[in-house]
Image: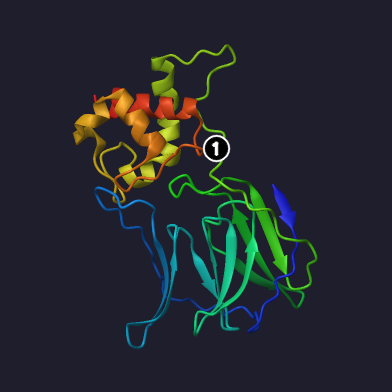
Amino acid sequence: MTANTVTPTLSGGGKQANASPQPAVLGGTLTLAGGFGQNTGYFTAIDVTTGKIAWQKRWNESCYAGSTATAGNLVFVGRSDGRLMAYSADKGEEKWSFQLGAGANNAPTIFERNGKEYLVFYAGGNALSASPHGDNLWLLGLDGTMDQAAAAGGGQGVGHAGESDENGNNNSETSAAAGKKVFADNCAGCHGADGHGGNGGPDLSTRPAAKNLTAVIAQVTNGGGGMPAFKGTLSEAQIKAVSAYVTQTIAK
C-alpha cells in the first residue's frame, strides 16, 4: 500500500460541507441483454428543487464510483481509468484531474485537520468494471508536492483463489472448490451469492450454456451480453476455476 501527498491545483475552494446528515444519493449500472459493446457511463447532477438535470458527463466506460461534494462548489468522483476528477458542482466544469494508478472505483473522503484540508482515496480497481487493479492509498493535500502516478493501462489481476498449487496441480475438482472464492469475489455482486440472480445478473442455474465448460470459459474471458470481460483481470487459472464452479455447482 502506498501513501502519497500531492498538489491538487483546484479552483473554487475546498472547504468540507457541514457534517449534518444528508440524504443518500444512489447510482446504479444498467445491464442489457445482448450487450452493445463498450459500456457507457453517465455522471449526472440533478437540481433537487426541480428534478431536472443540471449537467451531465458522458464517459466511454461505466461510472462505477461514489462522489463527494464540498461547500466550496466542488464535486469529486473517481473513474475506472484511474483518474480522480474534480468538477464545479454548479456547472460541471472540469477543474482538476489526478491519475491514481489503479481503478478509482471508490468514494472520496474529505476532512480537515489542524486547519488544513485533505482528501483520502483508495484506488484498488474493480473486477466487475474490469478496471486496473492496485492497492494505492492516496492522501491529497493543497500543499503536497508528489506527482501523479502513471496510468495503469489495462485491467490487472489480483491474488484470488484458483491458482495452481505448489506442485502445479489444478484438476477439475480442485478448480471447482477454488472457483467458489473467485465467484464470491468477482461474480456474486451481479449473479447473487448462489448464482441464482442478483444485481441485474441472470440466474445461471437456468442458462443451458452455463452447463458447458467451454462456453463458460469463453464468456468469462471475453464478456458480452452486458457482462465485462475478465481477461487481464483474472488469471487463466482463475477463469478455469470459476468456470468449473459454475458448471459443476451452480448449473449442475
Residue 123 position (above or below residue 182): below
Q: Is residue 179 left or right of residue 191?
A: right
Residue 112 position (above or below residue 198): below
Q: Is residue 114 left or right of residue 29?
A: right
Q: Amino acid at mark 1?
A: Gly
Q: Is residue 175 visible?
A: yes
Residue at the outermost front position = 37
Q: Is residue 17 left or right of residue 172?
A: right
Colouring of the image = rainbow
Which structural element holds mark 1?
loop
Q: Write down the quadrant of residue 172 in the picture.
A: top left
Q: Write down the quadrant of residue 115 in the picture.
A: bottom right
Name the spot of residue 89 as percent of width and height, x first. 52, 81
Which residue does the numbered mark 1 point to in the structure image?
Answer: 157
Residue at 50%, 85% in the rendered image = 90
Q: Is residue 212 left or right of residue 178?
A: left
Residue 205 position (above or below residue 169): below
How crowded pointer 1 is (Cα within 10 Å; few <14, some 14-19, many 20+) is rated as many
Of 195 and 222, which appears nearest the observer? 222
Name the spot of residue 146 as percent of width and height, x first. 78, 61
Quadrant occupied by the C terminus: top left
Name the spot of residue 152 as percent of width and height, x first. 62, 49
Residue at 70%, 55% in the rendered image = 149
Name the spot of residue 39 as percent of width and height, x first. 38, 55
Q: Is residue 251 visible?
A: no
Residue at 77%, 74% in the rendered image = 114
How many numbered callouts? Answer: 1
